[in-house]
Structure formats: structure tokens, C-alpha cells
Image: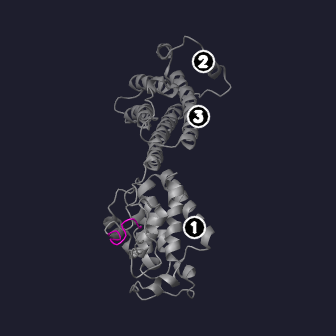
Amino acid sequence: MSKSLVTPRGDYKSLLTYRKAELIYDLTFYFCHHFLNLKDRTIDQMIQAARSGKQNIAEGSASGLASKETELKLTCVAKASFLELLTDYEDFLRVRNMKQWDADSQEVKFMKEKTVEKGITNQWFLELAKTRPAEAIANMAICFLHQEDYLLQKQLEYLEKNFLTHGGLRENMRAARLKEKKKTPSAPSAPSNPSAPSNPSNPSAPSAPSAPSAPSNPSNPSNPSTPSNPSKSEKAKELFHQGANCAQAVLGAFAQECGLTEEEAFKIASGFGGGISRMREVCGAVSGMVLVANFICGQSDITDKTAKDAHYAKVREMTDAFQKEVGSVVCRELLGLKEKQSDVPVSEARTDQYYKKRPCAELVGLAAEIVERTLFF
């Protein structure tokens, strides 16, 4: 049986970060209801911060089955929630002129020793807290929150390393699909001319070979016939020879992977041909790469700077690779046109001469190849 794409379910309750988060939540709940005015909005804010930290660890662990990106994001949210709670406890001590324990104090040393001592449970710390004043409980919470911050940082580093080593569900699904497609044998080719009768005057003589079939695009006789399962590079070239602009050819080659029909892909990319409607600016093949990346790994949360930066980096990886191969990402430069030259917004007829004088077919093929190796392997 092949290896499962979905990782085995992890029990979030076994995570040290979650067990520590439970202690912080329970301690905060006790502290707020015993030492803050019941009309103080800080009660709700502190309890919600503690709850957010705990629940995001649990939700992140569960979502990691399908999305490592979501698991990382929710773990970061948990870390931020606990940092918010930490500042609330520090504010409580500061505005009341209470002492905050130094990092090398006897109290902090005691807390560290008890944290690693066998047999010491969350309940033991809660019972201890109930015998202490507000100042001591706030300091205990601060100790636990610093420990939790350290543990969550280590957890994030582990998740990042695991993702870089093993990948996420999306790319594992694509890799498995590509592997399965390679194992599927292609259908046998049909006889070259099954309708041609044998030589009636000499039945034993072999039939004369049939003439080669005409190319699929009569306006471009040099276009080779398409194999039964073309690569994405070949597919992009084929679409270009069929009349697609450069951006349409690249996005169209990956329409299925983007969850689009070819017609939808062509419509989305229709204005990017000719360096954006023949302005001769960014090459349409490059725009096509960006469009594919947007569908596959684009940022949907406009407030998520981490996701935005990660997506920008992935797009730049592709555009830099393209520029390294051909020297530019600008349409006019790739076509050898004059500086700042743009054309009227009227497309040219696709004639034999058109295909001979332009490098566009090779450029869309290169763009599709870069997308495939960057986003799907």
C-alpha cells in the first residue's frame, strides 16, 4: 500500500506547549476573578488572551493534518496571544508598584526547579497559587509565560524544519499524482493508415506507407504534433501556436491545477499579452507565471505579512530564474524593440512569418518549465 498523503493524527494534549497553556489559562482565570474588579474589562481581555493561546495550539495541531502553513500560522498566533497576556501581568505589577522577580532571583530559580521536577503537576502549581497573594501569582504567571514563549519558539522551528524536509499536503498530493501518471502506460498508437487497402494485385506484398498527416495548425507547419501526454512546457507552446497570448498560454497550461477551465484561464490572462495589451512592458509569459503562483500559493489574508512576504519570495524565485535564462522580463527587450516603444492595441495576425520572427513560443515553454519545477516539485 502506498504511503498516505495525510500525516498520522497527533494528539495535541500530549504537546508540552498545550499542557503549559492549560496551566496558564487556569491560573489566569483564578487570578482575574480573585484580584481584579469584576467591572474591569481587563478580566475579559486577559482570559481571552489565555484562551486564544491554548485553543490555537490545539487547532494548529489538528489543522496540520491538511495544511502545514495553517499549523505554523496558528502556532504563531498562540505565541502572540501569550505575549499579550505577559504584558498584562507586567502592567498589573508596574502600575501597583509591586515587585517583578528578577531572572536570577531565588523565586524564579524555585519555579524552574519545580517545573522540571518529576511528579509536579499543573494542579500542584494551582494549589500553591491559591495560598499566595496577587503579586506572587502574577510573577508565577510571568515565569510560565516566558517558559511557554521559549517552548513555542522551539515548536515553530521544528515545524519549519519538518515542512522543509517533508513538504506539505498540497505538494505531496501533486508529487504523488505526477508519480502515478508516470506509472500509467500510454495508449498504443494507432496504425498509420488503417483505411488504406492492401495491394490487390499482390496480396503478399506489404502496403505502401501512408503520407504523413498534416500538422494541426496549418498556419504554422513547423509546429510538431502534440504527444498524448505533453509536458507543461509543450502544452504552453501548443496553446501559443493555437492563438493564445503568452500569459494565456502559461496559465492555460496549468488551468486544471489552478482549479480553472481553460476558458476561465484564457479570460483571466487575456489582458496580459504583448507586455500588458501590447504596451511591451512585463512579458506575458512572466505575468502568466505570476498568475499561476497566485492561484497555487497566493496570499488570501491581506493582513498576513508573513504570507505576503513568502508569496513575493516565491514569485521572485521564478522571475529571477526566467531573467537569468533570457536576460530580461520586459517584452520590448526580449523582442529587440526600441526603448520605451509600445504598439497600438491591435493584435497581429498569426502567420508563418509571425511565428518565425518571435521567440515567444520558447519563452512560454521556459516559463511553464520554471513554474512546474518551482511550484510542483
Q: For the residue carrying disc 1, how many other residues have a C-alpha within 10 Å: few (<14), some (14-19), or many (20+)?
A: many
Q: Secondary structure at mark 3?
A: helix
Question: Nearer the N terminus, badge 1 or badge 3?
Answer: 3
In the rendering, at what x and y percent does residue 294 appear?
Answer: 43, 59
Q: Which residues are magenta?
A: 197-205
* Closer to us: 360 or 127: 360
Labelled disc at residue 240: none
Q: Quadrant of the N terminus?
A: top left
State yes or no: discs 2 and 3 in contact (Cβ < 8 Å): no
The kind of residue tagged 2 is Val
Residue under numbered circle 2: 116
Judge whether residue 309 can be spotted in this image. Answer: no
Labelled disc at residue 322: 1
Q: What whole-number distance in Å separates the C-alpha atoms at marks 2 and 3?
A: 17 Å
Question: Nearer the N terminus, badge 2 or badge 3?
Answer: 2
Judge whether residue 179 can be spotted in this image. Answer: yes
Q: Secondary structure at mark 2?
A: helix
Question: Nearer the N terminus, badge 2 or badge 1?
Answer: 2
Q: Is residue 212 above or below residue 154?
A: below
The single residue placed furthest to the right in the displayed view is 104
Residue under numbered circle 3: 154
State yes or no: discs 1 and 3 in contact (Cβ < 8 Å): no
